[in-house]
Image: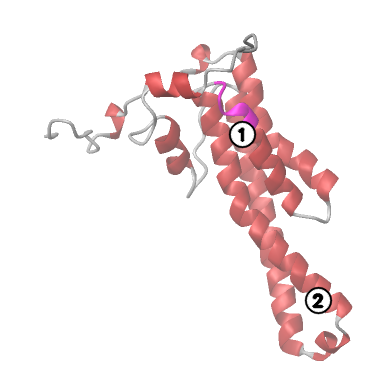
Amino acid sequence: MAVSGVKDTADPMKAPYPLPQPAEVSSGERGSATSAYLMMFAAAYAGLPLPIVNLIAAIVYYLTQYKKSRFVGFHCFQSLITQVPLSILNMVTLAYVISFVLIDSMHESKLFVAILAVGCALTLLANIVYSIFSIVAAYQANKGGIYYIPLFGKWAYDRFYGHDAMDEETFQAHHTPIVNEPPTT
C-alpha cells in the first residue's frame, strides 16, 4: 500500500509514464533514437585512435537530441551511459599501449607484457559486446521499440519513464525551445 504523497514503487507496471508502443513513435523519433547508437561507429572511425572522441560525440548527441521526446531521450541516455565505461577502458588500454611503445624498459617486463596482452584482449571483447548491444538497441529503436542494455537499461528507463522521471509539465517546460523575441529596451 502506498503512503499518500509517495510513489508506489512496488509495481513497475504502474510507472508514471507509459512506454510508447511502436505505432505511437514517429519516424523522426525512430531515426534520432537509432542514430544515438549508430553514431558511435562514425565517431570511432573519425576518432581512431582517440577513444575520448566517442564519449564527446555521445555527450553532444545526447545534449542536442534528448529534448525531442522521452523515447529519444531514453535511447540517447542509454547510449551515453554505456559509452562512459567503454571509453574509460579504451583510454586506459591506449595509455598502456603507448607507454609500452615509448618506454623500452617495458619490453623486458614479462608482467607488463602479460597485463598488456590480457588488457588488450578484454578491451577488444568489451568493444565487441558493446557493438552487438548497440546494433540490437539501434534495430529495436528503429522499429519503435525499447531495448534494455544490461546494467544500463533500467537507469535509462527510470530517468525517462520510471519513478525518477520528470512530471509531464516539468518535462515540457524544460524541453520547450526558446522562441526568438524582440530585444528589450
Q: In which quadrant of the rendered view does residue 6 lie? A: top left
Mark 2, secondary structure of its residue: helix
- Residue, x 39% and y 29% (percent of image)? 166
Q: Report crowding for label 2: few under 14, some 14 to 19, many 20 or more residues within 10 A (C-alpha).
A: few
Of the pair 172 and 19, the residue shown nearer to us:
172
Of the pair 110 and 173, the residue shown nearer to us:
173
Quadrant including the C terminus: top right
Q: Is residue 19 above or below residue 162?
A: above
- Residue, x 82% and y 78% (percent of image)? 100
Q: In the picture provided, is 94 more to the left or to the right than 37?
A: right
Q: Is residue 132 above or below residue 173?
A: below
Q: In which quadrant of the rendered view does residue 135 lie? A: top right
Q: Specify the segment rendered in magenta.
A: 62-68
In the image, which disc is placed on residue 63?
Answer: 1
- Residue, x 66% and y 22% (percent of image)? 31
In primary-sequence order, the first of circles 1 and 2 is 1
- In the image, farthest residue toward the front: 185
Residue type, numbered disc 2 = Ser
Q: Which mark lies nearer to you, 1 or 2?
A: 1
Q: Give the residue at mark 2.
A: 99
Give the x, y percent position of residue 43. Answer: 77, 42
Quadrant including the N terminus: top left
**Residue 111: in magenta span:** no
Residue 138 visible from this viewpoint: no
Of the pair 150 and 52, the residue shown nearer to us:
52
Q: Report crowding for label 1: few under 14, some 14 to 19, many 20 or more residues within 10 A (C-alpha).
A: few
Of the pair 101 and 53, the residue shown nearer to us:
53
Residue type, numbered disc 1 = Leu
- Residue, x 81% and y 76% (percent of image)? 99
**Residue 66: in magenta span:** yes
Give the x, y percent position of residue 13. Answer: 30, 29
Q: In the picture provided, is 174 more to the left or to the right than 35?
A: left
